Image: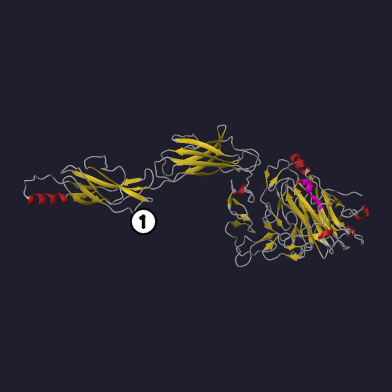
Amino acid sequence: MTYKVQVIAVTTLLLWQILLNYGQNEPVKMTLLGVKPFESENTKTHYQCHISESDNIAATAHVESFRTVWTRNDANENVDPPAPAWNAGGAYKHWRVTLDNNGNNDAFGVFGCEAALNGKITTSISGIFMRSDAGIVPSDELVSLTVNAGDTDVSIGMKSIGSSNVAGFRWLKDNARNSVISGQDTWVISGPVEEDDAGVYECHIQGQRINATQGLKLLIVRACPAQRWGPDACHGICDNCYNGGICDETSGKCICAPGFKGANCEEGCGGNRYGDTCEKQCSSTDKSGKCSSYLFCLAHPYGCSCNTGWKGLDCLTACDPGTYGASCLQTCDNCQSDACDRYTGSCTGSSTSCEVGWTGNSCQECEGARYGKKCADDCHCSKEYCNQVTGECSEHCNSEWVELFPPNLCQTGIIDAAYPRKNPGVTVPVTCIAAKGPNPSDISNLNFVLPRHHENLDDNGISRKEVFGNATIRTASFTVDNVIDVQTLYCQLRKDGQQYAVYNITIDVFDLPVLKSAPKKGSITNSTVTISWSAWDEENEDGDPPVIGYTPYYKLASEQDWSIQDTSTSIKALNFTFTALTPEERYSFSVAAVREGEMGEGPKSPMLNATTICTVPLSGPEEVQANVAGERQENVEIL
């Protein structure tokens, strides 16, 4: 008696080494199709191995059948399946393995096909067959589970069909009993999952293993963390795999769920298709729904599922509203109507449009360079290089992100730069914040600079104060003198004199308030002039509030330089009297509004020109003095 301990829809991890040597080679594309997989007591139970090549090529393949692992107690209860037979009849030729039951439960267990073709990498696939009167079945009614190396909180659950007490549950993995787990309905894998955790998990009622009524489940462990490929280092970033597709850890390509095709599994093929390119049909009539009652098993790490549109251990239950895809594991949540075709995922109902932010045939693809469950996060590269599940990039990082610590692709860089908005011309504090993704290395050996130019590192008037933080987040603080509006600064991470990441900051300063009208004249004497003005109005005049006061200016009309009088700060009043002026002299007057903060004074208003009156001898007639004063009061002009 021989059997394969290796389990589950498996292309072995040694394929990675093979791929390194024969990178142009591809695995044999094969589908194991289980017929009546939940009726192993049925004498017609069998499985078919369909190779996605032309029939002439498929016929030349070397195909073997095998039992993956013992699921009962001795050799007589774990009979090897017969050799595959080439079936040249029907619409699609295939290799067939007939599990002649003969009432001995020989069709119960985990069986598979291994196919080899010249120029291709050998592929081995397994599928599960259980009885329809099983006393225990997987609690989620799925016969396989795929996880990633390093995943946590992984568990295998079983449930009783009938009145069996959980206390009588007995667990085995790959035919080895685990007494610690027995008496429970869930096998919890403690700590991060490892490749050795992969295998066939079995749960039966104490003393009844001989009856073949236990539950079976395949646990597949990808050799890399989630969304990574290329063991052992696993530096590769997986393609975006939609509609239930899974990333092959040996190539980074997508293995599409049954009923979908395309490089990213983005195209649904309806309910009557399967195969690597949906080249095969369950029925020659090509009508949806014809692939029910079959179990479809694909190469590692996909495992087994129903075809799109169906669920349940027997794959005879249609998807519930709002779900679609293989074993109905996908949802229509990204459709505006929350309804979609159960075979393809295309939106149906009152609206066939995707929710905002989503696109694609089944609205599973983030629109633009975004990622995450709600497409709420920005990728650090263009969309074509971004994994829209994790946000990791395969190459071509945006300027503010770099690849310094593989496999931390485009996850180290400057995440933010901040400064307080100030009035133009002042000194402004600027902070640059850098972060890195998960990796044992840190960023403490990287240098922060903040030049005024992208290349020549001009830092005139810029001082770095301090750098603080930890191995994951670091912040540098700078001061920048004499800031002006729309000035660009460049936060940079550098190492060994080389530029690594650049984050541009465009400075936005407050607009200083402007008084559009000249002040108005008030009383004029031989040595004083009083002016007044309207308060600055945010709605009708330029600038940013708040205005906290005004500065009145004066000068001789014939001169250029302005002066202020009797005050070193702005005033809150809307009028001012200039004193100690020269009699019979022409002056110019202006007012500047002042907003809060250092250097908040705005430009001067239009000018008011006025001339002081002359000094009249005290012995002169009163009427003459009055006439002269009246004439001088009128000697005012606005410019």
State the SS at label 1. loop
Q: Position of residue 615 (x, y in %)?
A: 12, 44
**Neighbours of disc 1 within 10 Å: few (<14), some (14-19), many (20+):** few
Q: Is residue 300 depicted above or below 208 in this figure?
A: above
Q: Does residue 36 show up?
A: no
| Front residue of this view, candidates 638 and 185 | 185
Q: Position of residue 59 (x, y in %)?
A: 83, 52
Q: Which residue is mark 1?
A: 539
Q: Position of residue 584 (x, y in %)?
A: 15, 44
Specify the segment rendered in magenta.
194-200
Q: Is residue 291 magenta?
A: no
Q: Quadrant of residue 423?
A: top left
Q: Quadrant of residue 588?
A: top left
Which coloring applies here? secondary structure
Q: On the rendered structure, is 385 left or right of 66?
A: left
Q: Residue farthest to the top?
A: 496
| Front residue of this view, candidates 44 and 74 | 74
Q: On the rendered structure, is 198 left or right of 544?
A: right
